[in-house]
Image (cartoon, helix red, strand yellow):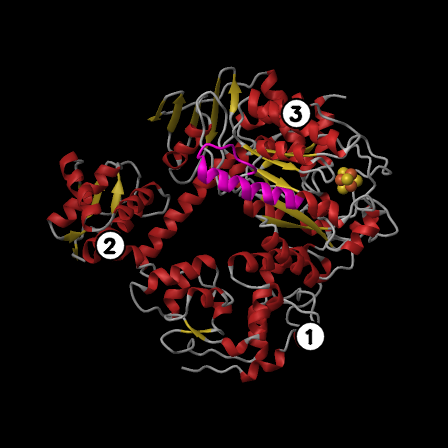
Amino acid sequence: MFATTSLAYSYDGSFEGLLCCVFESYQWKETPLAIHSEGSGQGLLLEAKWIETDKMKADRVLRSIPLKISREAEDLLRLGFWSAVPDKEMLLLNFLYLGFTHGPAVMNMLADDTVCALNKAVRLLRREGHHYLGFVRFTVYGPVMAAVIEPQGYVLPVIEDHFCDRFQSESFMIYDRTHRMALIHQPGRRAIIPLEEWIPPQPDETEAAYRSLWQSFYHAIGIKQRRNDRQRASMMPKRYWKHLPEMTGKQADRPVRTARKQQTPRRPRELQ
Amino acid sequence: MDMMEKLEILTESAKYDVACTSSGSQRSGQAGSLGNAVSFGICHSFAADGRCISLLKVLMTNGCIYDCAYCINRKSNPVRRAAFTPQEIADITMQFYRRNYIEGLFLSSGIMRSPDYTTEQLIAALELLRNEYHFRGYIHVKAIPGADDALLSRLGMLADRMSVNIELPSQDSLRKLAPDKSKQSILQPMGLITNKITENSTELVKYKHAPRFAPAGQSTQMIVGATPDTDYQILNLTEGLYKKYKLKRIFYSAYTPVVEDSLLPSLDTKPPLLREHRLYQADWLLRFYGFEARELLDEAAPNFNPLLDPKCSWAINHREQFPVEVNRASYEMLLRVPGIGVRSAQRIIKARRAGTLDFHALKKLGVVLKRAQFFITCKGRPLEGLKVGEHTLLRSLMSGQELAKFQQPEIEQLSFFDDSYLAALPEAGRAASFRYGG
Ligand code: SF4
């Protein structure tokens, strides 16, 4: 939209910081070559302008979004920021250019490259969030429980309400090891806080007992004659398996016969 | 017998019931209780057969006084028997739920002593969960045919979803394979549940806090491939059940031989997974795409083509309705185009407001052009360079990827590009008359 400068922007990686990049771009009527967050290790080859995070500037940009575009656009922007798409900053900046030009109509421009890419990124984030509603596994330590996840996108704010509602009377933590953040909940209180590291303690005997019950259930429920590893891996991608007791327990280590092997000539012999 | 062994036995014998969805109920959590329910349902894991695990699916007992031929729990089958107490069921459900292993419980049972006694046991387990443990997660319970109406009504007040399995799609098949059951004994509780749900919904209009009867509705299951019933029979029955009994879902279960019986396919028969898949596709067409059973199949062609999905088959046989102009077609018509699903149809409607769409745009909206190209125009024109020979058409409509998922030797061995197979497809000869108009 504006002339492209030969500069990249670099910012502190916060949502407010990104909004300040937007402010900067409008102020100087320039489009940066790229936007990098501090410490992402990118952009060493580009000359970069450091954009200081300024709450006032960020607020001005943020307030104008529902006014000039729409509430939904603001939601989309936030979700896009949490997504794991590469170069998300430029995508979001381009989306705002479009939004400030076309107003609320931008939300219908699904065939536009930027809008399409942003929607796709947000869909992926939402899907990952939805996956985690099912794939989070708590370990119970007496009165508290804890889970570790390693998501690609920053899903904690997406799944927060669900778990806090479901486990209202429980004290729990969900630790996002990728983004080093933790959702902490106690009855009546919750927060998402930075947490550099957390190593889960060994489960006690009761915990181990329920885990193995769950593992036996898992293995008993599958129908042998319908075995379909490909389907399973597409519904439950392997990157989730590490934190699923049913996929890591003793039983899960049993050699997996692939679908191919099932169809080799050995099969008739097995049937006898 | 220890808990582990019991759980194994009672899961093994419950797994042939394919329903595992936890959808249809929306209920928020509450202080002092555990759990909630979300209307879209949540899968917590996927079994080695690729199917969703959402609920702790177990039987109360696998002992049974009946002798249904297709059932692993039939009286005359020598298997290990076990039974849970209501207390054990409630305990393991709570423990699994807390760890987020499951969305809730799917409880069913063989018939112990009598249908009434069995239902009382189910009620005891659910009462414990709901009233003592304050469990607010999802519960699916099987209604036992032949049980007293009053008991079934009580059961429904404790559960989110109830189901009575039809299992066999015709009276004839029932008589042969499930001599202790009749069409009547299955439809009767089904009707009762439908009435209770309707009654309850008028009560809810009057008193907002009236207790809810099976808020996630009713479902059923049919076994496919144990009997000679055709897809047409099955689909007609399906349509009738959705209409008459307002069922939420019908599940199809490819018959997996578990017991030897002269009346049944032999033990080494493979479950007809592709046929099951086609039925699910057709079921979707009925529920979400505005199709009727008689549009998809008829007496003359009573079974689905294994190579083409039901919508493509329909489109090939109704070429006079195509091509449609994407920028003008109604939502209903867009849904009938192969390669356009519910989501892409919705996106097309939305994106049309922002400007005229071309083929490039459609691709971005998620339309599968490989299939849709034969049936649509953009701004009055077909896709540039489109060739509409009958073979191109049919080959493009068959999805090798979809078929490959089934890993069935008979499909694997067959070459998709084998002309003799193409010739067998419905009315392939009419491709030449497939024209584009303004
Ligand atoms: S009544 Fe149910 S459990 Fe008993 S044999 Fe028939 S299908 Fe199996």
As shown in the figure, which amino acid type bears the numbered disc 1?
Ala
Q: Secondary structure at mark 1?
A: loop
> Where residue A179 sits: x, y (%)?
37, 33
Q: Is-magenta flag for residue B49? A: no
Q: Toward the viewer: B23 or B358?
A: B23
Alpha carbon distance from label 3 to label 2: 55 Å
> Where residue B378 sits: x, y (%)?
38, 73
Residue located at (48% from left, 36% from top): A133
User: In front of the other: label 3 or label 1?
Assistant: 3
Q: Toward the viewer: A210 or A88?
A: A210
Q: Residue furthest left?
A: A28
The residue tagged 2 is A104
Residue B39 visible in this rendered orientation of the protein: yes
User: How many residues crowd around disc 1 within 10 Å: few (fewer than 14), some, or many (20 or more)?
Assistant: few
Mark 3 / mark 1, whichever is N-terminal: 3
Q: Could you tell me which quadrant the C terminus of chain B lies in?
A: bottom left
Residue B42 visible in this rendered orientation of the protein: no
Of all chains, the one bearing label 3 is: B
User: In front of the other: label 1 or label 2?
Assistant: 2
Of all chains, the one bearing label 1 is: B
The residue tagged 1 is B424
Residue B58's place in the image compared with B71, above or below, is above
Q: Report the span colored magenta.
A: B190-214
Q: Residue furthest right?
A: B262
As shown in the figure, which amino acid type bears the numbered disc 3?
Ala
Q: Is-magenta flag for residue B207? A: yes
Q: Secondary structure at mark 3?
A: helix
As shown in the figure, which amino acid type bears the numbered disc 2?
Pro
Residue B112's place in the image compared with A226, above or below, is above
Q: Residue B124: which numbered mark, if any? A: 3
The answer to whether mark 3 is within 8 Å of ligand 1 is no
Q: Residue furthest bottom?
A: B433
